[in-house]
Image (cartoon, rainbow, N blue to C red):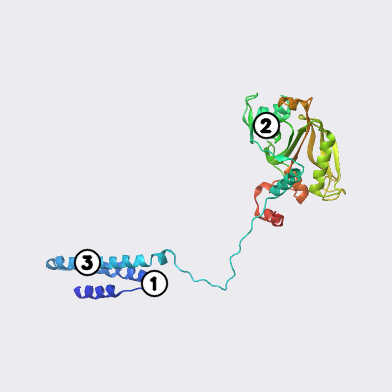
Amino acid sequence: MQQAIDQYTAEINAFSPASADELETFRIKFLGTKGIIKDLFEQFKTVGPEEKRTFGKVLNQFKQLAEAKYLELQEKFKSEIENPKSEIDLTLPGDGFQTGSRHPLSLVRNEIIDIFKRLGFVVAEGPEIEDDWHNFSALNFPEEHPARDMQDTFFIKKNNGKDDIALRTHTSSVQVRMMENGKPPFRAIMPGRVYRNEAISARAHCFFHQVEGLYVDENVSFADLKQTLYHFVQELYGEGTKVRFRPSYFPFTEPSAEMDVSCTICKGAGCNMCKYSGWVEILGCGMVDPNVLENCGIDSTKYTGFAFGMGIERIANLKYVIRDLRLFSENDVRFLNQFQSEII
């Protein structure tokens, strides 16, 4: 045994590996579970009692020598062990990567904002969780109005009174906050997400996105409203797009109207997108009801204004011929990749 230890000691002292792989071979040979040191300790069990003391000391010193040598060399090759080199074939093509793209709703939202900014409108935002006053009462919604019913509104806290808290059903609540906290003139648009308690289908969703607009000043007329929206349509869909206004009703505007544009898909000939009428309704609008102005602390005898609101999904449907609203929120990469060329 002594002769073997002397031989292995000389081998350890002379060992000078060129790589981490050689060092690992050394560890397995001497310190592994089936290595030389393990074998020597097994042989030590057969040594006579009078020799155990001498050989035990020699064997422990040999083990300490092997461990110290390994630790010393391990520090030297530490970086190589932690970051092993891999053979790289430089003839292989590089790894491809996908570039991102804007969501179609973001593209349409930004385009709408840019058009109205050029007309002097600023962007205003507000909370998505609103109280009854800002979401309904200040906007002239009667107590019995169906929009207050649970079938249309996601109520968070409902006390059948002014303490009702709900997810906003429109961004008109931002208009109320703006008029309460400032003084005319106001010229702003309010983009944002809104919520309605509706069944999800290809034509409806429980949440969607709106852009509403408000202009309040002295001597604002319905003619100003019509010309503003006519300019918006020409900028968005191109010159020659026809526009028509139909009488309608909204609690917060009087008179009220819905605005249609000639179908940009069939050019007015009739298709399933326009239900073969040649027209597509894209927004509601009207003159701000004097009660709404008074509710917000604005003198309705001095100031008038107009308001409008549109669904961004509806605009995007017509612009990109998308027939299923659910595609906007499913995050299907195959759908989103179609808008790579639309990055701006």
Q: Identify the disc placed on residue 235.
A: none
Residue 298 placement: quadrant: top right
Judging by the rendered image, the residue that carries numbered circle 2 is: 177
Q: CA distance from mark 1 to mark 2?
A: 71 Å
Q: CA distance from mark 1 to mark 3?
A: 26 Å
| In the rendered image, the vertical position of residue 118 relative to residue 304, given as above or below | below
Q: Residue at position x 71%, y 46% from top? A: 109
Judging by the rendered image, the residue that carries numbered circle 1 is: 19
Which one is closest to the eye, mark 1 or mark 3? 1
Q: Amino acid at mark 1?
A: Ser
Closer-to-camera residue (91/126): 126
Q: Identify the disc placed on residue 61.
A: 3
| Lateral position of residue 211 relative to residue 131, left or right | right
Where is residue 256 drawn, in percent x and y?
81, 32
Closer-to-camera residue (311/54): 311
The tag earlier along the polypeptide, 1 or 3, is 1
Q: Amino acid at mark 3?
A: Gln
| Lateral position of residue 62 relative to residue 229, left or right | left
As helix, strand or loop, the secondary structure at mark 3 comes to: helix
The tag earlier along the polypeptide, 1 or 2, is 1
